[in-house]
Image (tube, coloured by chain):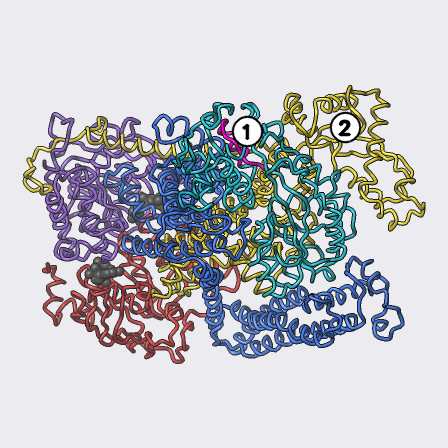
Chain colours: A red, B purple, C blue, D yellow, E cyan
Amino acid sequence: MSGMTTAITPTPKVAAMNETKVSARDVQVYYGDKHAIRDVNIEIRSRTVTAFIGPSGCGKSTFLRCINRMNDTIASCRVEGNISIDSENIYDPKVDPVQLRAKVGMVFQKPNPFPKSIFENVAYGPRIHGLAAKKSDLDDIVASALQKAGLWNEVKDRLDSPGTGLSGGQQQRLCIARAVAVSPEVILMDEPCSALDPIATAKVEELIHELRENFTIVIVTHSMQQAARVSQRTAMFHLGNLVEENDTDKMFTNPDDQRTQDYIMGRFG
Amino acid sequence: MSGMTTAITPTPKVAAMNETKVSARDVQVYYGDKHAIRDVNIEIRSRTVTAFIGPSGCGKSTFLRCINRMNDTIASCRVEGNISIDSENIYDPKVDPVQLRAKVGMVFQKPNPFPKSIFENVAYGPRIHGLAAKKSDLDDIVASALQKAGLWNEVKDRLDSPGTGLSGGQQQRLCIARAVAVSPEVILMDEPCSALDPIATAKVEELIHELRENFTIVIVTHSMQQAARVSQRTAMFHLGNLVEENDTDKMFTNPDDQRTQDYIMGRFG
Amino acid sequence: MSVGLIFLVVLVLAAAGYFVGRARALSLSAQSGRKLHSLPSYYGQTVALFIAVPAFFVLIAWLFIQPIVIDSRVNGMVPDSVIPDGGARSLVISDVRRIANGLDAVLSRDAIDESALTDGSIDFSSIRGRLADVGVALVGDVPTEVFEAAKAYRQGAKFGNMMMTVAVLLVAIAFGAWSYTWIRPDMRARNISETFIKALLIASSTVAILTTAGIVGSLVFETINFFKMYPASDFFFSTVWNPQFRGGSDLGIWPLLWGTLYISLIALLVAVPIGLMIAIYLAEYASKAVRSVAKPMIEVLAGIPTIVYGLFALITVGPFLRDYFAQPMGLGSSSSSVLTAGLVMGIMIIPFVSSLSDDIINAVPQSLRDGSYGLGATQSETIKKVILPAALPGVVGAILLAASRAIGETMIVVLGAGAAAKLDLNPFEAMTTVTVKIVSQLTGDTEFASPETLVAFALGLTLFVITLGLNVVALYIVRKYREQYE
Amino acid sequence: MTDVSVFGNVAKDIQTKSILEPDARTRRRNAAEARFRLWGAIAVALGVLALVGLLASIFSNGLSSFRQTYVTLDVFLDPAKLDKDGSRDPASIAKVSTFGYTPLIEKALAEAMAAKGISVDGMNAKAASELISKEAPASLRNHVIANPSEIGETVSFDLLASGRIDGYYKGRVTMESAALDRNTSPEQLQLAERLKEAGILTTRFNWDFFTAPDASDTRPEASGLGVAILGSAYMMLIVLVLSLPLGVAASIYLEEFAPQNRFTDLIEVNIANLAAVPSIVFGILGLAVFINFAGLPQSAPIVGGLVLTLMTLPTIIIATRAALKAVPPSIRDAALGVGASKMQSIFHHVLPLAMPGILTGTIIGLAQALGETAPLLLIGMVAFVREYPAGPPDGFFDPASALPVQVYNWTQRGDPAFVERASGAIIVLLVFLILMNLIAIILRRRFERRW
Amino acid sequence: RDQIQIAGSSTVLPYASIVAEAFGENFEFPTPVVESGGSGAGRKKLCEGVGENTVDIANSSSRIKQSDIDTCAANGVKEIQEVRIGYDGIVFASEINGPEYAFTPADWHNALAAKVLKDGQLVDNPYKAWNEIRADLPAQPILAFIPGTKHGTREVFDEKVLIAGCEENGTAEAIKAAGGEEKECMTLRTDGVSVDIDGDYTETLARVDANKNGIGVFGLSFYQNNTDKLRVGTMGGVVPSVETIASGEYPVSRPLYFYVKNAHLDVIPGLQEYVEFFVSDEMAGPNGPLAAYGLVSDPELAKTQAAVKARTPMGALN
Ligand SMILES: Nc1ncnc2c1ncn2[C@@H]1O[C@H](COP(=O)(O)OP(=O)(O)OP(=O)(O)O)[C@@H](O)[C@H]1O
Ligand SMILES: Nc1ncnc2c1ncn2[C@@H]1O[C@H](COP(=O)(O)OP(=O)(O)OP(=O)(O)O)[C@@H](O)[C@H]1O
Ligand SMILES: [Mg+2]
Ligand SMILES: [Mg+2]
């Protein structure tokens, strides 16, 4: 039972690399009166790691949350325009956001483990999606997710202790493990390595590499190095606008936009 | 009345640079049965930036929280050993943790703005410590703290909107501004730049530089570059032990301990 | 089958449906190799819901309609001649019902065959005695028509029951089977069952609306009657409350409203500070052990019957306040007073404030406390400036609940504050409240269709409208000051 | 005061503050802290004190109702009086009313006194027989009807002593008060003393108090809480089964699903307002809707239960909503983020975290419902009921009374013996309440946690 | 429904429950259910209509009113029997250790009325102590706990004490002379000397207990159960007792009634038996348990018994 097939409408053919997975057209996001995202148009390719970069508060998280409709939960937030995944408009009234989110997993910027045990934190997703028929399957899923997130060694002896009693970085990895455990098709990661040490970061980057073979990944990061290391495509946001979107190599060597150049060179502000 | 000079019992001599500000002797920390910090001995110098590095979960935050007794709020947490600031044992029963914390400020790993307006978030500390006699003083303090944290431009038009409606990085800077506004003698920063873009990071680092002239700063960071850039001293933790403490230059060029070397070279795990 | 049994059978069917539905979903998915849209249990749930809900619906409708149908049929069999003078048909019909039900007992006790009822092989002329033997008391002898009607009723009920059983089970099975065959791996079973649950949630919240409608409906009619007898202007603008037994009463609402506000205010002045401090102490300062004992203990205060508080007010608090405060201060010598009732009522409503607030305060995330402590705030500053504002909506809810309880209380007011309606500022004076007068006018010895009694309805409705207004204001305030954390 | 910038041009010399010696402001703040904390402790102490005081007065008044004085007599069941035609036919035995049994008891008492040589000056047989409850003939008669074969035999009975005699052994009646009391006399008390010495009269635990039905004003000693306990139990069962799920469901809808609009505002205000509706108005509603419209029977627990359900609902809803509101949004986000549906995120994560608040609402709501009399007044449950209701569910439709009703009724009665019994009933009510809430309290402790 | 359902006055409730209890013991029928909730509500329930979920009997501490009869008629309750079960004496009692009081209605009017006649002038009530009214009354401050206006007892108090007293001490004439109405005789002072009690006699007792110089208005049966706590005052020189009330010497008393819905007589099992049992000599006679409890037996009980047997419906109110 592979995680691949949790699609709303199962994707019949396996998406080839570089095919568009997510596409956004003229997306506008408002928080009440505040216009947080303006006219964003972007194609996110399948089996590719796309990095979102940009100064703090420019709308990266906001746009990311649009992709799995997590913005629905903020009362004041309004999304306009069109975002589609596998050519299906996700803001179509017929779309079940739940299914969408099962397909598009998310790691939040602030680690938010459930006030439950470490095991339950990771097992929750697989459980509600019926990914494990037996208890032992579940154990396996949890173990492998924790391993992928590089947390297994630290917590394997205390799977029953509360997830909220972990260190900041551990919580972050726990949330990564939790998202990975349901094997979504698209994984949105909002600064997944912000609280991680270089080694843990390396492990997560390795995980991203690994996941890329089968999944589409969008990652928000403040580290240019990280963006350069893990992503194939990079999108640069500034003040709610998508300034530039390009191949990562190109972006970091020869950006089209002046602002990108400035930002990468650390010449902003 | 400057924030600096509210001291009532003046310590006769002025702390000179390189003088010991905080000193820890045989500190042990337990969470229930878990022994999280073992035998830590460290001298943290006055007017110096000390960086704590080490893999996630090694006890950096835990030790940091010991320094201003924030661990008191965790029921299961037990601290043994001796930590003194200005030669006063902070675990002395006579010590008032409130005054200690006014003297030793803290920026937490997870941004935790109060559910109040941005202004109120920053004004909270100065208010309780009586740092502003007039409303205009308070306005000044708030503005200058926000400026220091590099948030002023982004929020100056919406000081009345809730602090919880900020982006992740903005929240982090808000928390820095909040801590800085009460001008403590020692500032503990737990990964203050983890959610910040390079420019904002640079701004915070600049702030740290500036603060160093008068204050003692301890910063937890996962970025070796950052540690190298901002700190004069670096302490490396590993599995609850303080592996090495040294001048930053020495630490990053020629560490005494093999584990430090490995960690810095990214050879762990 | 009895209704209870049918109910059980449907439940069992639903349970069975759950398992077959689940199994089918699993096997279909295994066969077709397609993944299920939802967890298998949701398919089970869907089938179970399809079995249970329409069936229960039919059951309830049937139970509602069958008696009407049978009654109307039996009604036709009872000629007017057997209805006693001045009696009512409905009473005879209930006699019929009683006989019909008694017959079952007679048959089973005397081991008589069902057929004996119809073929006349046994003498049923002594039916009254036989029924009396099985504990069914009748008034007089049973006229043949009535007995026949009873038999018909029994037949009808039996038949109806049988039909009901059949119908309910049929519906259950039909819908179950249909939903069973409907199962496909891509069926959105979770959405179906969730839509269903959501409908239940909505239905539940309409209960509140229905209750309000019911209350208004049951008050408004008699209120109109009241205003036909007593001028509304006097009711709303007169400042004298002086009902008289034989009419000619003054029924101005103001003294009562004033008493209500005054007493509730004092009660809140007692309960809110104490209750909030208790909540704060238990949530923030007390050890786990103290908290786990003190909280339920204080909750018992809400469960002590109000008469105990009333007597406490009357016997202890009232004389104490009179002897040590009112008389020395020259503020009167009444042992029952607004202050007495307010104080005692305040004690009673403490748990409403303390327990609910305690839960809310406890739910404020630790990171907020940390943030404040980290800035060098004391615990009390943290509580006052960070935690309470964050917990405000819940705390206001708790206070409103306490206020509501205070407004609705009678016994304490009767015993503590007396029954005299007065407009006075002196807290050592006896006064009374709207609620007390609703109860006393409604349960008095005055004739019902007099303004003195009907005023209770007008009072009830007016109070309802006033509290509604207060609640609107409260909602507005809470909305304005609400702080969302995280 | 000139320099307000935080560190701008501060002198480079920073004087550090000692943490061992608090400065004046800190001392002030700490004093405020200590005061605040003290206020908290005082508040808790006040609450507990009020409870202890009230409980002490209830217990000191009411504990005695758990004991009862009995007179043990050998009664000759005279066939000449009880079964005149000698047929032992239950029908003819039943013809003898309780009035016919009184002489038997009088005689038995006289004989017992004679046998033990007890006599008190100024007592005739009639006055002596007033020691025995008016309930005695009825219990005798019931026994005889149940066992007709014992007619003609001498059977030993434990008969209730009358209320005043019982009160004498509980300190309620004294020789002095008896002298003034129309219903007893010091001689009767002396006689009781003698009977006690002779072992005929005993005071012991009173099981009947928990099982017997109410009794009329002339027989306080025979009254019990059986019907009331059953009635309250039935009603609470209905209230719990209906109000908890309904209340939680309504709260979930309003808090989590309902769109923010006028209509939901209306519901919200409505619910808050329902909490403020005096309970008697719910009685008016119950009378109009459940009895007059729906045709449910008078005085029945089903109607009482429904009315109390409507009355408790607002409490539970308000508590539940506050608790739901207090659950941090990040928990919901986390669940939604892994693909849980809203319903799942609520039932799996939010509801467990809100559980303490929900349980508190339930505890308080049920406490209120259990102690309420006013709405029952209008639906006919404030009544004198002596027949036990049948077992559930049929019993829901039989007349019954309730514990608070019994308290209310007894406090209104003339005979002071009822005051004691009312306090006893309150103790039973509180025990009932605590038992009922125990599960909720334990559950709540388990769910309580901070995050 | 198997049992008889009774509603109404809480004054009649004790008697009704004594009868119901004995009825349940001695008859094969279940014990009737006796609700309390006030005469007005009881009569309203009686008149709600005919049928199983309406009551069979309404107890009433005052006579049924024309409006009730009209409601009954409108709802199809055509025939009602009025059954007078006896009389309820109303007594004035103070704390047992207090002084003796020998009242007259005039004293009460002088003590409680808003306006009294003093030195030939109609003035606001100046009296503070009983002996100011009449020198041979005790020198105690005036404080009276009288039934609230919802009580039937208050009607009797108004009529037989206040109005009677008003006429006795000449205030009535003065009022009339001043162009006022008789109603003003019943207007009470509002300075806290006269306290309305909306609760029951136990509350009055508790208040007398808490205010040792207070005088309470009680029912005779309540007083008889508490002779060790209360000292009863005489009225016009007569000590209240079952005998003096029955003979009419003691002036303050009122009849108690219950009303039976005739339409239910043949359909509610035991109803007729209950009604007959209630008024039988065994129960309501001078030596019966009701009299023992303080009900003043009706001298015309035999007439009532006959009427009950014949099921005579009540005629028009006179
Ligand atoms: N409240 C707690 N209860 C129990 N264990 C805890 C608690 N907080 C931290 N720990 C454990 O103590 C150890 C040290 O945690 P700490 O938060 O100090 O790590 P850290 O060095 O700050 O890591 P990171 O860089 O990930 O934030 C970890 O193993 C963590 O799981
Ligand atoms: N819930 C909200 N209500 C109102 N404004 C919001 C809310 N969330 C974010 N914003 C505003 O929207 C803008 C974009 O926010 P967003 O969180 O997307 O930034 P970001 O790019 O993720 O920044 P960071 O790197 O700091 O996390 C910011 O100006 C922020 O203040
Ligand atoms: Mg962000
Ligand atoms: Mg940390």
Whether residue E145 appears in magenta in the rendering, the answer is no
Can residue C59 be seen in this snapshot?
A: yes
- Along the line of sight, the residue nearer the viewer: A152 or A53: A53
For mark 1, what is the residue? E94
Residue C347 appears in the picture as rendered: no
Taking depth in this image into account, of D223 and A172 the one nearest to the observer is D223
Asked if the residue at label 1 sits under 8 Å from ligand 1, the reply is: no
Label 2 resides on the chain identified as D
Residue B24 to residue E281: above or below: above
Magenta stretch holds residue E215? yes
Mark 2 secondary-structure assignment = helix
Part of the protein shown in magenta = E204-219
Count the marks.
2
Q: Which mark is residue C414?
A: none
Q: Are marks 2 and 1 on the same chain?
A: no
Q: Which of the 4 image quadrants contains residue C26? A: bottom right
Q: Are marks 2 and 1 in contact (CB under 8 Å)?
A: no
Residue marked by disc 2: D127
Crowd class of label 1 (few under 14; some 14 to 19; many from 20; radius 10 Å):
many
Residue closer to the observer: D234 or D116: D116
In the image, is D346 to the left or to the right of D369? left
